[in-house]
Image (cartoon, rainbow, N blue to C red):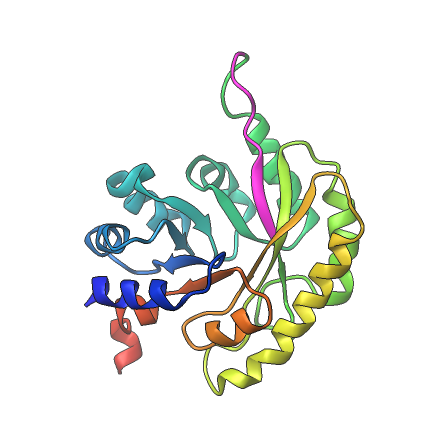
Amino acid sequence: MIRENVQKILAELPDGVELVAAAKTRTPEEILEVIQAGVEVIGENYIQEAERLYEVVGTKAKWHFIGHLQKNKVKKAVEIFDMIETVDTAEIAREIDKRCSQLGNASAAKKVMPVLIEINSGEEKQKSGITPENAMQLIRGISGLQNIKVMGLMTMGPRFGNPEDSRHYFVETRKIFERIKKLNLPNVEMKYLSMGMTNSYKIAIEEGANIVRIGTKIFGERDYERK
């Protein structure tokens, strides 16, 4: 089932749109199956889960962190992940920068972590992310950091309900993306717009997403979602 689901999604995605398989609560066997089916990027919400998966899967895929990142988890995050999609404060950005600078040794180049700024496009109190009106200030403030590079924006949108209800959030995030792109800030390359999940990714693509994060449509519902 997983293989067929992946192949169907990949076949319908437009050129230039990247699929991130959202792996929260999934097994290493399931992750290996999606990779064999053609997925190149695994998204993980939790550092401890990612560690367990990484022990088995390793570098067979790229890894994106797509959950809320706590400061005390950053050291491990920069060791595992190829991109962090959920930067929403200057404090977290500085910690990522610091931890990347400590990787490697004198003869090796320090790691530069690609990051996306998470926009709380619906300004929902229960969700992470910076509010749209403060995004520009955050990006300006962290653009001088040497060991991270802002590569774009990420937003969630509602997980359930009518997918059309997400469109407004995606439109607003795209507007912020375009405004920041025009500024030509140092260490800021507005290349990726990560929007949309299983319920809303088709709407997100229509509004400019070039990364979509899909879990349920690949793996099926988690046990607790079936209840």
Viewer can see residue 119: yes
> In this view of the protein, which residue sits in the foreground, 144 or 11?
11
Magenta region: which residues?
107-116
The residue at the point 47 percent across, 86 percent down is 161
> Is 122 on the left or on the right of 11, as rendered?
right
* Quarter of the figure with the N terminus: bottom left
- Tell me, yes or no, whether the highlighted magenta stretch contains residue 41: no
Report the magenta stretch's main SS.
loop
Determine whether, in the image, residue 102 is placed left or right of residue 3: right
Judge whether 124 appears above or below 193 on screen. Answer: below
Left or right: 209 with respect to 51?
right
Q: Which is nearer the eye, 89 or 171?
A: 171
How far across and how far down the image is residue 194, in percent? 54, 60
- Image quarter in which the C terminus is found: bottom left
Residue 206 percent coordinates (x, y): 55, 73
Residue 112 sits inside the magenta stretch: yes
State whether residue 155 is above or below residue 30: below
Please name the residue shown 63% across and 75% down the image. 169
Task: Judge by depth and name the residue closer to the eye, 15 or 203.
Answer: 15
